[in-house]
Amino acid sequence: MILIGRYHSPFVRRTGVVMKTLGMKFEKQDLSTADDAPEIRKFNPVGRVPSLALDNREVLVDSAAIIDYVLEVADPDGRLLPKSGSDRRTVLRTAAIGQGAMDKAVASVYERTRRPKDKVFSD
C-alpha cells in the first residue's frame, strides 16, 4: 500500500496516524498539492490528498474513506472505533468536529497564500 500526500496536510496526517496506530505496513509518497498536482491526479482526479493505492491497484480517496477501509481490515474488534452505540457516535462526532475545523483552517491558509492579493477577502 502507498499513502499519497505529505504530513503537512492534516488529512494525510490523520490517515497516517490511524494506519500506524493499527500497525499497518505502508509506503508513503510525499506529494504536494501545490507542486505535484499532475502526479496526484494519477491517483485522485480531483487532485486532493490523501489517496491510498492498495496492492490490488484499487485507489481510495479522502481520509474518511481511507480510514473506513483501514478500520475494516485492521481493527475488527473496534478498538479505535466501537462497532455501535453511543461510544461510536461520540468518536464519529469528535472526528467530524476536528475534520471540520481542519477544513476551515486549510481554506483560510489557501485564501491568504494562493489567491492573488487583490482577490483576498479580509475584514
Image (cartoon, rainbow, N blue to C red):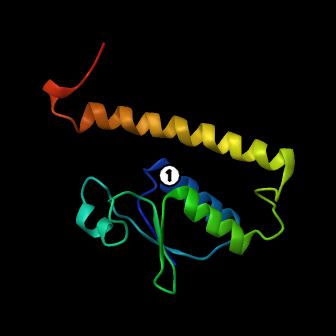
Q: Mark 1 belongs to which amino acid?
A: Phe
Coordinates of residue 68 in the picture (x, y in percent): 64, 63
Q: Secondary structure at mark 1?
A: helix
Task: Identify the residue shown where x is 76% and y is 68%.
Answer: 75
Coordinates of residue 33 in the picture (x, y in percent): 31, 55
Q: Is residue 82 left or right of residue 38?
A: right
The residue furthest bottom is 56
Mark 1 lies on residue: 11
The relative height of residue 108 versus residue 14 in the rendered view (above or below) is above
The residue furthest top is 123
The relative height of residue 68 versus residue 123 in the rendered view (above or below) is below
Location of the C terminus (image quadrant): top left
Task: Identify the residue shown where x is 54% and y is 38%.
Answer: 100
Mark 1 surroundings: few (<14), some (14-19) or many (≥20) residues within 10 A:
many
Q: Nearer the viewer, residue 54 or 29?
A: 54
| Numbered marks: total | 1
When asked about the image quadrant of residue 84, the answer is bottom right
Res. 37 in view: yes
Res. 36 in view: no
